[in-house]
Structure formats: C-alpha cells, structure tokens
Amino acid sequence: PRSHSTSLHRFPFAMVTEHDIDFFEKLLPRQAITDPDVLESYNVDWLKSVKGSSKLLLRPQTTEEISHILRYCNERNLAVCPQGGNTGLVGGSVPVFDEIILSTSLMNKVLSFDTVSGVLVCQAGCVLEDLNSFVEENGFAMPLDLGAKGSCQIGGNVSTNAGGLRLLRYGSLRGTVLGLEVVLANGKVLNLLSSLRKDNTGYDVKQLFIGSEGTLGVITAVSILCPCKPKAVNVAFLGCSTIQQLLQTFRCCKGMLGEILSAFEFLDSACMQLLQNHLKLTNPITESPFYILIETSGSNANHDEEKLHNFLQHAMNTALITDGTMAKEDSKIKALWMLRERITEALLHDGYTYKYDISVPVEHIYQAVQDMRVQLRDQAKSVVGYGHLGDGNLHLNITSPFYDSALHSLIEPFIYEWTAKHHGSISAEHGLGLKKRNYIHYSKPAEAVYIMSHLKNMLDPKKILNPYKTLPDYIS
Ligand code: FAD
Ligand code: MLT
Ligand code: ZN
C-alpha cells in the first residue's frame, strides 16, 4: 500500500504552527483537535491500506466556519483533506502527509424536507442511514443505498458520486442531486442549493463538484430528490451455473419484471466461501458457481409477487437458474441482502485487499476475474468477483495475507490494460483518490485530463484541497 505514495514528495505547503492552532481553537472551541489518540483513526482509511500523519483535526458545525477555515488555510498555504464518514475505498479520504483533516461529522442537520416533492435539503455530514430513516418516516426513501450506509455521509457520497445498490432503479446522483452548497478553496460560499427539477440556465456548475473527491471545493449542504418508499419489496436469491445463464437471467428479468426491478446484483462462489469462512453467514440455497440477488420494489404486493413468481417459474423451467429462495418479510430480506452487502467486510478478514472497480460492456463482466486468475495462477489467496451486474459494474478483488509488492505488480497495470482493451472504465463508482489517480489515462483522453487540470487551477490555484488525489501526478 505504501507504494501509492512512496514516490510522492510533499508539496511546499506551510506547516501547522502554534499560532495556527490558536486561530482554529478560537474559531472552533473544543473542535480543533490535536490529541494523537483521536487523530489516529482519522489518519487511516477504512481498508487500513493508507495512513497519513495529520496533527490537526477540525470539526466545524456550520458553512460559515468552513468558509473561515478555508480562507485562512488558503492565505497561509495550508493543505486540507476533507473527510466525511471515511469509508472511501481509494485512499482519498485520509491525508497523505500532514494535511489538516476537515471533518464534516458535526454538520449533521436536516435543513428542510418537502413532503409533496420529496426534496430533502441537509448538511453534508448527515449519515446516509439516518437520512433514510428520516425520510422513511415521511413515506419516502433515499435514492441511493450502499453497504457503508451506517457510516458514510451524504457529502462523501456526492463527492465520490457513489453508485451503490439502487442505481439501477433511481439513477446516479448526477440526476437526483438537485443542488449543492460548496465552500471554495478561497473561502467563498457558492450557493447552488436549488430544489428545482428543471434548470437549464447555462452550465450546470454543481456537476463539477459531484464526483470531484474534495479536490475542487468542500460540499457543505445537499438538496436531493427522494422517491416514494416502495409499499412492497421482494428479494430473490438465486443460484446459476454459468456466466451465460447469469446474463440471460438478467435479460429475462428486465423483460418480465420491467418497472418493478430495483436491483440485480451478483456474487461468485469464492465470495460465498469468504462470507461463510469469515463472517459465519449461511448459504440459503444449493452451492452454485454464481449467485444472483434480485430485488423488486413496487406499490402493489400481489401484482409484484405474481410477476416475480412468473419470472422465477420461467427461469427454473428454462434451466437458467438451479435453485433459489424468496423473501418478503423485512428480516429475511435483510438476511439475503447481507450476503451481498458484507462481501467487502469479509474480504478485509481475508487479508490485504487489492480492490478494482471496473465497468465494462455487460457481456464481458466476469471475464476480468477469469483472466486475472490465469494471470496470477497461485500467487494470490483469493480472486473474487461480485457487483452491480445490472449496471455493468464488476468488483474484482484479490487478497494476500499481507501487502505483497510482487503480486501488486502482477495485477497492475494488467487490470487497467485489460479494462482499456475492453472499452471499460477503471473506476466505475469508487473514484480515483490516491490509489488510482495515475491510471486516469486508461479511461480518459488527454484532452479531458487537460480540462480537469484547468478547472483545478481555476478553483484552487494553490492546490490546497485534497492534494495528491484524483489528478495524476504529472499535472499536480
Ligand atoms: P469519505 O470516505 O470520508 O470521503 C470520500 C472522498 O470524498 C474523499 O476524497 C474526501 O476527501 C471527499 N469528501 C468527503 N466529504 C466531502 C465533502 N463534504 N466535501 C468535499 N469532499 C468530501 N461506493 C459506491 O459507489 N457504491 C457502493 O456500493 C459502495 N459500497 C461500499 C461498501 C462498504 C462496506 C464501504 C466501506 C464502502 C463502500 N463504497 C461504495 C465506497 C464509497 O465511496 C463510500 O462508502 C461513500 O460514498 C463515501 O462516503 P464517506 O462519507 O465515507 O466519504
Ligand atoms: C460494493 O458494491 O459492495 C461496494 O462498492 C464495495 C466494494 O466494492 O467492496
Ligand atoms: Zn459497489
């Protein structure tokens, strides 16, 4: 993991002085933290694969405080690492050197909720699961869901343009986010906190900040469109023998379930092994090479169940699937979802995880796993594939007992070359962060990277915001 940053040199930012700490302590009483024990967990990422050495953590509560912080840091040439729930998977949320950690954890207030339109406006530090519970009380649901929902924050979700488990149904945050409030590197507040569905007054500037991983501004508030909470939810967990059957099942499922299909996820048998070995979860069906999780969400339980039954009968009769189980009660639905959502955690128990998140034309979705197994022979502990099949998004994960640089160099750039050859994206949903910034050219033309560097220069000329992330080293 160290290899992501060993070749890096600290940019010539100023160092935090006692005088700076005095300033921040006055601005944020008790929330300018220098205690190394508290700082420890903020300096390490969720995967425990990258570690910074920041000596100062700031926990503001308001946009104005963030504005003061950034104006001061910009004047003093102090680097800042914005941090939400610290569940990011590409090393973007922790400092590389001694950047000041700017945590949004205390910015956790709902600002308004419109029970007619479903538009929620909230501060950036609201935890996704808390927001979901809040809107559910009003008959709505958040348009995104992910395994990290208990810790990740909406500001972090927007900053990474997180995809997750509901994207198939509700689309990406680029559509559901209606407005943002952002503090720019110089401390100016950019108020784009619109609640409008339609607004074609020139360029859609807020899109720049969606997926910009804290490199262009700090998101302080989000306006987001929530769909109605579905009245009926069903989940089916199915077994499948081949990848061709998996793809055929998806095709058939789209045709037969239509508008009620809300998730089509998959995992391979190697993932199931990890869930059983490390988390003691039980496989509810006969062992299979592949497993599918299908969710339907609709407004009429009988209608949805009938559709799902017809689909399952057809899939069994035509031997697309080998076995399956269904759930309509909350607890069983949750238990089935755990088999998909907890793979990331199971991998962490397996050893050091080399994590790849690619999108490819769906017919090639599993080929990367097969080709990687050939490439690595017996060098890795596990090579597993799972992901959002419905979105053409594969999570290819490899583990070894400890970080192994020889193994790492067998995986990279092989996987990036493979992805480029298949016209895919080297980061479908996790972003580039620290780990993938230098591979951007595999998925983006030089002209696009050039525009990105100009945008960075314009919005953050001193490059104080999340340095060493997202943009490749040669333009930083
Ligand atoms: P952090 O991890 O704290 O930060 C992520 C990035 O955003 C960093 O670059 C940080 O600097 C920046 N940032 C954070 N807050 C702000 C802000 N307010 N303003 C500006 N920049 C900011 N991702 C998916 O897309 N789909 C999934 O299904 C998915 N599942 C996951 C499951 C697990 C178990 C885990 C651990 C992670 C998963 N992720 C998934 C990764 C995903 O990126 C994060 O979970 C989430 O979107 C990040 O939110 P966060 O608040 O933790 O942000
Ligand atoms: C998922 O879909 O489970 C997440 O993106 C996390 C991961 O890739 O492990
Ligand atoms: Zn994912």
Image (cartoon, grey):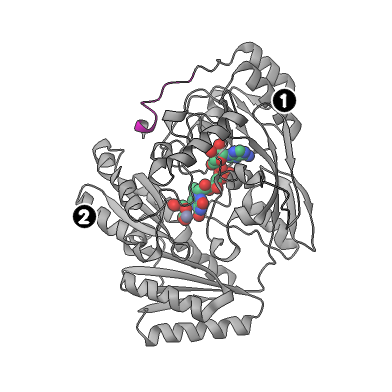
429 horizontally vs 321: left or right: right
Is residue 445 visible from the viewing direction of this image? yes
Few, some or many residues within 10 Å of mark 1 (<14, 14–19, 20+):
some
- Classified by dominant secondary structure, the portion drawn in magenta counts as loop
Dot 2: element: helix
| Depicted 292 relative to depicted 143: above or below | below
Q: Which residues are magenta?
A: 3-11
Which quadrant holds the N terminus? Answer: top left
Residue at 55% over, 77% down: 258
- The secondary structure type at the circle numbered 1 is helix
Residue 289 picture location, percent across and down: 31, 68
Q: Is residue 4 magenta?
A: yes
| Residue 286 appears anywhere in the view | no
Q: Is residue 45 left or right of residue 127?
A: left
The answer to which image quadrant residue 169 occupies is: bottom right
The outermost residue toward the left is 377
- What amino acid type should be assigned to the residue bearing mark 2? Val
Across and down, in percent, residue 372 comes to 27, 53
Q: Which residue is mark 1?
A: 68
- Give left or right: position of 305 versus 299: left
Where does the image place residue 145, in percent across and percent down from the top left?
Answer: 57, 57
Q: Is residue 222 above or below residue 322?
A: above
Q: Are marks 2 and 1 in contact (CB under 8 Å)?
A: no
Q: Residue at x 69, y 23 (%)?
A: 71
**Residue receiving disc 2:** 374
Residue at screen point 33% across, 62% down: 366
